[in-house]
Amino acid sequence: MGLFGKKEKKIFKEFSKKSVEYLTDINKDTDELLEELQESYSENRFAIPEFMNLIESIKAKISFEESEKLEELSQKIVQIKKCAKKSVSAVAELSRNQRKTTREAIREFNEFVES
């Protein structure tokens, strides 16, 4: 005779089923967010080089002080690009980890319910 009766196993199975549904929904949401971030990043990744080219063409036409301010702004924008790239990478890693956790949880639930 097992540790749990039919009633308890039924409860565990239902809990397992709901947990898998929640984990699957989280995976789907994370994957959708990652896809949106990747698309947005891809669409805008050429903006920085275009902006830098524009700055170079403008520098000769403006004062030294304005040129310095423009250079500072360009450096800030480059930092924003780096931050965006790190964000995309972080969400990609989160998505991979979530899928791995989901697979492990499903396996453990199945082992527990079947025992």
Image: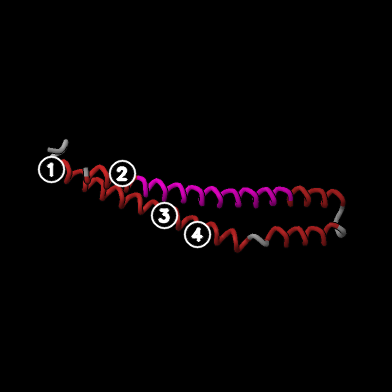
Q: Secondary structure at mark 2?
A: helix
Q: Which residue occupies the extreme front position in the image?
A: 1
Give the CA separation, mark 2 to mark 4: 29 Å
Q: Amino acid at mark 3?
A: Asp
Q: Which of label 2 and label 1 is nearer to you?
A: 2
Q: Mark 4 or mark 1, which is nearer the start of the sequence? A: 1
* Crowd class of label 4 (few under 14; some 14 to 19; many from 20; radius 10 Å): some
Q: Secondary structure at mark 1?
A: helix
Q: Residue under circle 3?
A: 29
Q: Mark 1 or mark 3, which is nearer the start of the sequence? A: 1
Give the residue drawn at x 53%, y 57%.
37
Q: Amino acid at mark 1?
A: Lys
Span shown in magenta:
75-104
Q: Say left or right for 21 vs 94.
A: left
Give the CA separation, mark 1 to mark 4: 42 Å
Q: Amino acid at mark 2?
A: Glu
x, y (%) of residue 83? 62, 48
Magenta region's main secondary structure? helix
Q: Mark 1 or mark 2, which is nearer the start of the sequence? A: 1
